[in-house]
């Protein structure tokens, strides 16, 4: 478990910056060492995407779509207050995982198919199906894929610049050592 200070140090960001992310992404706030490694991995993903020049508003939009999709699929029925973060840090099957929550949907995201109707909650079923109430998981997945594709394009364009900047910074560091 991590404190806010531990996460700030691990991400090389001030605690006030992380606190702002918590507020803007509507994340639960804990006291002391109450943050899981999955929580840290979510913040790491956001920080990495921001380094790749993906706007925070784009990330928040994608975040809301992911949470909505997971709610429609009843992933939120686990009882965990961080249910939407619990898969962060998991590896494998990246083609099946959502970008921010890292949740594995069990099928390739591009296939635009989902196993609908699963509900692990102990609550009584709704009178009407979600689709009849205007909530359609496939529609939300389509919106998600549109936003994800745009973000992926932004990331790919920026990766080249970030790699070049890292090489440049490495040269500066080497020349600094040789100048001593």
Image (cartoon, rainbow, N blue to C red):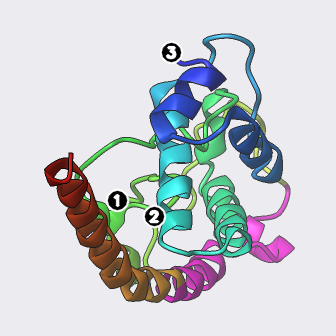
Q: Which residue is farthest front?
A: 180
Q: Which residue is farthest top?
A: 32
CA–CA distance in space, label 2 to label 3: 33 Å
- Examine the image and state in which quarter residue 61 appears: bottom right
Q: Are marks 2 and 3 in contact (CB under 8 Å)?
A: no
Residue 114 to residue 160: above or below: above
Disc number placed over residue 136 in the picture, else none: none
Disc number placed over residue 115 in the picture, else none: 2
Label 3 residue SS: loop
Closer mark to the observer between disc 2 and disc 3 = 3
Q: Where's residue 43, x and y in %?
A: 56, 45
- Kindly identify the residue that appears in the image at 65 percent across and 42 percent down: 76
Q: Are marks 1 and 3 in contact (CB under 8 Å)?
A: no
Residue 10 to residue 55: above or below: above
Report which residue position mark 1 lands on: 106
Label 2 residue SS: loop
**If you read the primary sequence from the N terminus, does the residue marked by circle 1 or circle 3 appear first?**
3
Left or right, residue 91 beside residue 4: left
Query: Which is more toward the observer, 92 or 131?
Result: 92
Report which residue position mark 3 lands on: 1
Q: Which residues are magenta?
A: 127-150
**If you read the primary sequence from the N terminus, does the residue marked by circle 2 or circle 1 appear first?**
1
**If you read the primary sequence from the N terminus, does the residue marked by circle 2 or circle 3 appear first?**
3
Q: Are marks 2 and 1 in contact (CB under 8 Å)?
A: yes
Residue 59 counted in the magenta span: no
Magenta: main secondary structure? helix
Closer mark to the observer between disc 2 and disc 1 = 1
Callout 2 crowding tier (Cα within 10 Å): few <14, some 14–19, many ≥20: few
């Amino acid at each position: 478990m991590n404190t806010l200070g531990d996460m700030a140090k691990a991400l090389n960001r001030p605690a006030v910056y992380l606190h702002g992310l918590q507020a803007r992404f509507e994340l639960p706030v804990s006291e002391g060492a109450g943050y899981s490694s999955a929580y840290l991995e979510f913040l790491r993903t956001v920080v990495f995407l921001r380094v790749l020049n993906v706007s925070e508003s784009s990330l928040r939009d994608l975040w809301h779509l992911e949470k909505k999709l997971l709610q429609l699929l009843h992933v939120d029925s686990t009882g965990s207050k961080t249910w939407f973060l619990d898969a962060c840090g998991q590896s494998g099957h990246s083609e099946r995982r959502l970008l921010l929550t890292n949740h594995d949907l069990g099928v390739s995201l591009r296939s635009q198919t989902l196993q609908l109707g699963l509900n692990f909650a102990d609550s009584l079923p709704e009178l009407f199906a979600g689709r009849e109430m205007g909530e359609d998981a496939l529609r939300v997945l389509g919106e998600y894929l549109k936003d994800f594709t745009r973000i992926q394009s932004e990331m790919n364009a920026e990766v080249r610049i970030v790699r070049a900047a890292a090489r440049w910074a490495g040269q500066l560091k080497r020349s600094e050592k040789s100048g001593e």
